[in-house]
Amino acid sequence: MAATADAPLSAAAWELHLLLLSATSRAGLLGIMFDTSSTLPRQGSAVFVDEIRRLVTAETDRKIVQTVVHELGHALNLVHRFERVVGQAGSTSFMNYDWRYRGGGHDAEFWQRFAFTFDPDELEFLRHGPRSAVLPGDAAFHSVRYWSGYSGDSQPVPVLSWPGCG
């Protein structure tokens, strides 16, 4: 990304870099924001299109779009809705996973309700959050608890684990 980016990566800027790649060495990985701990975090994401096509047999284009927006959402400092600290496993936001919806096993319901949008607190944060927290290349990932006080469609968030994720 650093070698081919059209925009400089040397300062925080309203620039996001997205790599659409074929495959990854980590099976099951659909996308990633890959610069979480650098001096200028949250500037780039990658989506592994052929991995999505391999794992998702129906409506693959919908899953590719959802994954792209999800990863760009991370670059804007949005976090997963299913995280215990957020407590929104019942969300149909771009920032939730279909397979983690309502604790898992409700993929079809997620897609039936999915409206290609973010939750109200996420939109509020993107529109009115601290500039440094949203601006790619500025504040660290997960640096603002924008979800505090949001009641949404709260669901208990079970502890789940999957290979390669902490």
Image (spheres, grey):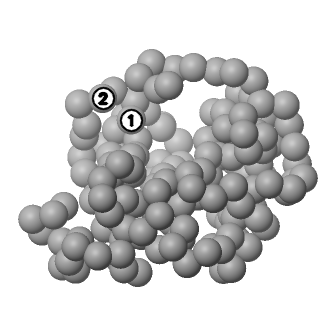
Asked if the residue at tag 1 contacts the one at tag 2, i.e. Cβ–Cβ closer than 8 Å, the answer is: yes
- Nearer-the-camera pick, 141 or 32: 141
| Quarter of the image with the N terminus in it | bottom left
Question: Mark 2: which secondary structure?
Answer: loop
Disc 2 versus disc 1: distance between alpha carbons? 6 Å
* Count of number-bearing discs: 2
Number of residues whose C-alpha sits closer than 10 Å to that of mark 1, classed few (under 14), some (14–19) or many (20 or more): some
Residue at numbered disc 1: 29
86 w.r.t. 45: above or below: above
Left or right position of 49 against 91: left
12 w.r.t. 149: above or below: below
Residue type at tag 2: Arg
- Nearer-the-camera pick, 34 or 101: 34
Q: Position of residue 111 (x, y in %)?
A: 69, 47
Question: Mark 1: which secondary structure?
Answer: loop
Residue at numbered disc 2: 26
Residue, x 66% and y 33% (percent of image)? 100
Residue type at tag 1: Leu
Q: Position of residue 3 (x, y in %)?
A: 9, 65
85 w.r.t. 125: above or below: above
Residue, x 65% and y 74% (percent of image)? 129
Can residue 85 be spotted in the picture?
yes
Left or right position of 51 against 149: left
Residue, x 48% and y 37% (percent of image)? 57
In the figure, residue 17 lies in which quadrant? bottom left
126 w.r.t. 99: above or below: below
